[in-house]
Amino acid sequence: MKIKAAVFRQPGVPFTIETLDLAPPAAGEVLVRVAAVGVCHSDWHLMTGATQHVTPVVPGHEGAGVVVAVGPNVSRLAAGDHVALNWAPSCGHCFYCLHDRPSLCGTFVGPIWAGTMLDGTTRLSQDGVPVYHFSALSCFADHAVVPEVCCVPLDPSIPLTVAALIGCAVTTGVGAVLNTARVKPGSSVVVYGAGGVGLSIIMGAKLAGAGRIVAVDRHEAKSDIAKAGGATDFLLAGPDTVEAIRALTDGRGADYVFEAIGLPRVQEECLAAARPGGTIILAGIAPMDSQTNLPGALITRQEKTVTGTYYGSANPARDFPLYADLYRRGLLDLERLVSQVYPLERINEAYADMLSGRIARGVIAF
């Protein structure tokens, strides 16, 4: 079938809207009519070269839609199902899956970075030439063929714009709080970066009962957005940020410091912002060739814990429905994350707005 998709060809060149061919789903795959896709930094990392990927590729990994058709051997899904898309598919039987770490599943790593399906081929092409998949989803398109395991059914009462954000930002952010850090009630939390993931961390910290939640961002416009999501304080990033954090936390530093940007210098600052015995959680995706200087002597002497969190240490089959239910019960105000909705043709404008810092999360809608 013919589809309309945003295509990335090389760093620094804007996304182009093109007509591509999409093959039918093979065994274990599903055809989804995409309804909404979040505008996320992880796709933008292709544009800057921070993430290197085979091209041409259709980005888009934070999506939701409706199942149109299923391939052979698909048993969990049927046409008409509403699904949020999981960009970290798992096999269910490797070491990591059996130890409840499906986001670290090794089975799909090779095909995902090769831009293919599990069988090593693509479903996307143009004039007979393969076009590659991003994160097994490629949902900056009106339709996508994805592995069955990438589809998590949600109740149709959940708006598909919200379901899309559950597919990445919400699960990464809320999961970082509940699954990775396991934030304790009454504790102090600092969040560097108030984009989609950072705001989700803030919402997760509020849900966990944190006593003080400090948002740090370089855009003043994020102050009201962060406080509406649950932050008790907002600091404009600058040379005195750590000192200001200590002033807000009885001079000690925060119990938990989350980095949701992916910049080594900010990751290094997070270590200073945490109290002795505190925990630093790195949620942002740093450039592939970057290095972060975290002095071991200080970590040892102050007993600080530094941990990464990938996809919020999530089990999407469990966590997507949980976050959807918390939204439905009014405990996660996820609609607040959606600042603006764009058609696919305005994708480059959507990314410009994201980079300007004036919005929480933009969403491409079909």
Image (cartoon, rainbow, N blue to C red):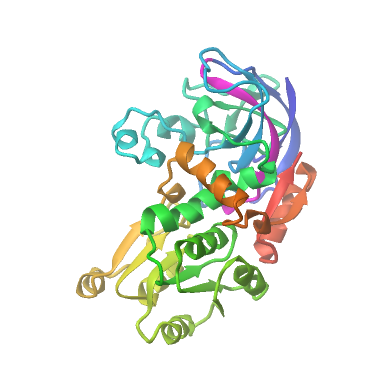
Q: Please name whichever residue, 238 or 12, is drawn nearer the observer in this view of the structure.
A: 238
Residue at 34% x, 58% y: name it. 307
Residue 313 vs 245, above or below: the answer is above
Q: Please name whichever residue, 127 or 282, is drawn nearer the observer in this view of the structure.
A: 282
Left or right for 273, reference 20: left
| Residue 332 sits in quarter | bottom right
Q: Which image quarter holds the C terminus?
A: top right
Q: Residue furthest front?
A: 329
- Magenta region includes residue 6: no
Residue at 66% x, 42% y: name it. 158
Residue 293 in percent (x, y) is at 34, 67
Residue 70 in percent (x, y) is at 60, 18
| Residue 151 sits in quarter | top right
Residue at 57% x, 27% y: name it. 146
Residue 242 in percent (x, y) is at 43, 81
Residue 9 vs 118, above or below: the answer is below
Decide whether the magenta segment is chiefly helix, strand or loop.
strand
Residue at 57% x, 36% y: name it. 85
Left or right for 324, reference 315: right
The answer to whether residue 336 is seen in the rendering is yes
Residue 164 in percent (x, y) is at 63, 43
The answer to whether residue 49 is seen in the rendering is no
Q: Which image quarter holds the N terminus?
A: top right
Residue 157 vs 116, above or below: the answer is below
- Magenta region includes residue 36: yes
| Residue 128 sits in quarter | top right
Q: What's the magenta region?
A: 27-41
